[in-house]
Amino acid sequence: MDSKIRNHATITIQQEDHTIGNIIRMQLLKDPRVRFSGYRKPHPLENKVEIKVQTNGEINPATAVEQVCTNTHEHMALNAYRMDQNYQNQHGSTLGRTMGGPSSYMTHGYSQM
Amino acid sequence: MYGMEQINTATGFANAKFGSSKGQGAKGFDEPEIRILELSKYVIKFELLNTDLSVANSLRRIIIAEVPTMAIDLVEVKENTSALHDEFIAHRLGLIPLQSFNVDQFNLSDQCACSSMCAQCSVQFKLHAVCSDRDQMEVNTRHIQPLSDAPIIPVQYVNDKGIEEDPILIMKLSKNQQLDMNLVARKGNGKIHAKWSPVATCQMRKEPIVEIDQDKINRDLDIEKRKEFVALCPREVFAFNDYRNAVEIENSDKCIQCIECLRFAQANNLERAVKIAEREDKFVFTVESTGVLTPEDIVSRALQILMRKLYELGTQMKKYGVNAD
């Protein structure tokens, strides 16, 4: 994955498209340790995206992507928690998922989908 | 069964103690907020704050294309003596929305352990219609008979007053024409075919900011021009106050940024009197379901799917991070 430049990685994700590519790229740009981040979909008929990451050496590019994923995941978990709270406040019933704190949204329900 | 409920919430969320480090700017996120503005049987309107545009767009994409539902996927034609050909009818049958509240219990058909079809991955129906006694007969979704106990049935729409609407018309038969088909419904998502998309529309927009310098407008334009200014907005964002003969902003949320008012102001040398902009950090979503899932369920599942994608990617990257060092 690492090419001739140090701290540089090209990650190819199969079966994904702009949905995930754009998020990862944008969030990587917000990290001050990332020097370069970009993504592309090589061909519209092929279902994969390529993400290029270069860091300034403080962290591994793979670690940078992993941290970005974890942070965004927690961000969305908080969103889901808030949404369920909202719904419960208005309707007095949950959306069928267990409440009990944002941390329960981190790995809940993945087996179903 | 309930009718239209308009719920406006000002603040409905508690402050979750979610971990002190998550509010850092270095991670790129402030605490996100999500507020449900309106909720009815088929439509949900909510807003996202302190979220990046890419996250909001990904949520929109997932709502449209990646929330799984059930739809008719295989049609076995035993008899078709009607005016429409087989694949035409099959196409229409595929587009019929099926209530998918139990869709989680089903597997995708290519991931199911069975050889071709089983109760875990498919739901069977029968469509049998004969026009024997009349000159013309309508075949609608009521003629689709489920062959199993699963609650996957065509959606029955209920309008605002709680009255059931007419069923969806599939086709019409003339005298002595027959239709005999076996239908199989499977799980899928919008990426495979649009018939599996759970929404009619998913609209995402940024909240508009409309500002007018009231003193300038009301001083430099005469009354007729002020009325013209109010009239040229296609969405009636402005209002003319007759008591004070002044232009006021009535509802800035309706603005579609067509900048007609801006052009009018420029033409009349009032360059800085009107400002049209968008709030960069607030997104208003309007999700209209087709009835296959409740709208709040669609949004909730979309959030879960996005979370799962990020989680899986993060787990995979963890392995690479460890190996590279």
Image: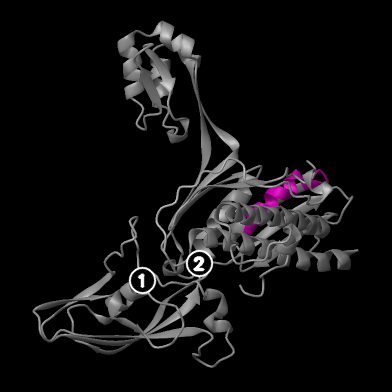
Residue B191 tag number: 2
Whether residue A41 can be seen here: no
Q: Main secondary structure of the magenta part?
A: helix
Q: In whole angstroms, how far apart are the C-alphas of marks 1 and 2? A: 17 Å
The quarter of the image holding the N terminus of chain B is: bottom left
Q: Tell me how the rendering is colored.
A: one colour
Assess whether residue A75 is covered by the magenta stretch. Answer: no
- Which residue in the protein does label 1 denote? B96
Whether residue B75 can be seen here: yes
Whether residue B122 is situated above or below residue A55 in the rendered picture: below
Number of callouts in the render?
Answer: 2
**Which chain's residue wears label 1?**
B
Residue lying furthest bottom: B115
Please state which of residues B289 and B62 is positioned toward the viewer in this rendering: B289
Residue for point 53% across, 39% down: B206
Type of the residue with mark 1: Ile
Residue for point 52% across, 37% down: B207
Whether residue B315 is situated above or below residue A111 in the rendered picture: above
Type of the residue with mark 2: Lys
**Which chain's residue wears label 2?**
B
| Badge 2 density bin: few <14, some 14–19, many ≥20, Cα 10 Å | some
For label 1, the SS is loop
Q: Quadrant of residue A17?
A: bottom right
Q: Which residues are magenta?
A: A20-35
Residue lying furthest front: A92
B48 with respect to B193 (left or right) = right
Q: Residue A93 placed where, x, y %?
A: 58, 61
Residue for point 63% across, 51% down: B55
Q: Residue B34 placed where, x, y %?
A: 61, 48
Residue for point 38% across, 70% down: B155
